[in-house]
Image (cartoon, coloured by chain):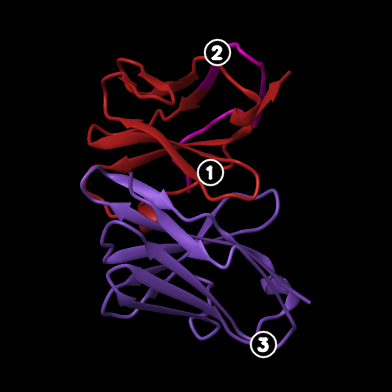
Chain colours: A red, B purple
Amino acid sequence: DAKTTQPPSMDCAEGRAANLPCNHSTISGNEYVYWYRQIHSQGPQYIIHGLKNNETNEMASLIITEDRKSSTLILPHATLRDTAVYYCIVRKVRDNYGQNFVFGPGTRLSVLP
Amino acid sequence: GAVVSQHPSWVICKSGTSVKIECRSLDFQATTMFWYRQFPKQSLMLMATSNEGSKATYEQGVEKDKFLINHASLTLSTLTVTSAHPEDSSFYICSAPFLATGELFFGEGSRLTVL
């Protein structure tokens, strides 16, 4: 079972920041938080991951709360091409992926013109 | 960055025939690859773990004789759907871990339609 909970859907206006929350209240100290997205009829695309510090790359920023029980993925200037299902996944640092990399239902983000 | 490629991206076949889907890691070696199945409006479900040089391990409920997996080299895993039936119609996705960064890269997916 997925160890994260996300809202099933969100809307965001084009050009505005999209803030996607994820709850992982049972996360343990050696588990990373990963974010992927899946555009319709494509394979999932890696976005970002982090352990406890906030992370930023060319796609997004990841904000992890101090207690690590939740995180927020931020797309700073959403475009129509960011419309996708976003998955938040937790994984132990040294675990193999496979069974330990479980996709929940994710959040369906719709970026509106 | 690391790339995983699948082929074909879509295939239509008649019931009873077999279909092979290839998954390649293009610029890195992958001793392990993963195969997922995704039905419409559902999330990805892990089917099996492909291990280079040894037998694949299958998740509960996945028939190993129906979904044959071969991991013949460090860059190629294949999934063969044998004697396909309409209920096997689905989106099949593979992935491979890039150990240097801890990222799991996914192929583009292969959409199988069995008539």
- Using the image, name the chain to which the residue with label 3 belongs: B
Q: Which residues are magenta?
A: A1-20
Q: In the rendering, which numbered label is found on residue B106?
A: none
- Residue A23, horizontal then vertical, whole percent: 46, 27
Q: Are marks 1 and 3 on the same chain?
A: no
Q: Residue furthest top?
A: A16
Q: CA distance from mark 1 to mark 2?
A: 23 Å
- Write down the residue under mark 3: B17
Magenta portion: prevailing SS class: loop
Q: Residue A78 vs residue B115: left or right?
A: left
Q: Which mark is residue A17?
A: 2
Q: Secondary structure at mark 2?
A: loop
What residue appears at the point 26 percent right and 62 percent down from the top-left corner? Answer: B29
Quarter of the image for residue B24 reads bottom left
State the residue in front, A101 or B100.
B100
Would you name the residue on which mark 1 appears?
A104
- Mark 3: which amino acid? Thr
Q: Is residue B68 above or below residue A92?
A: below
Residue type of the residue flagged with mark 2: Ala
Residue B30 point in image, percent of width and height: 28, 62
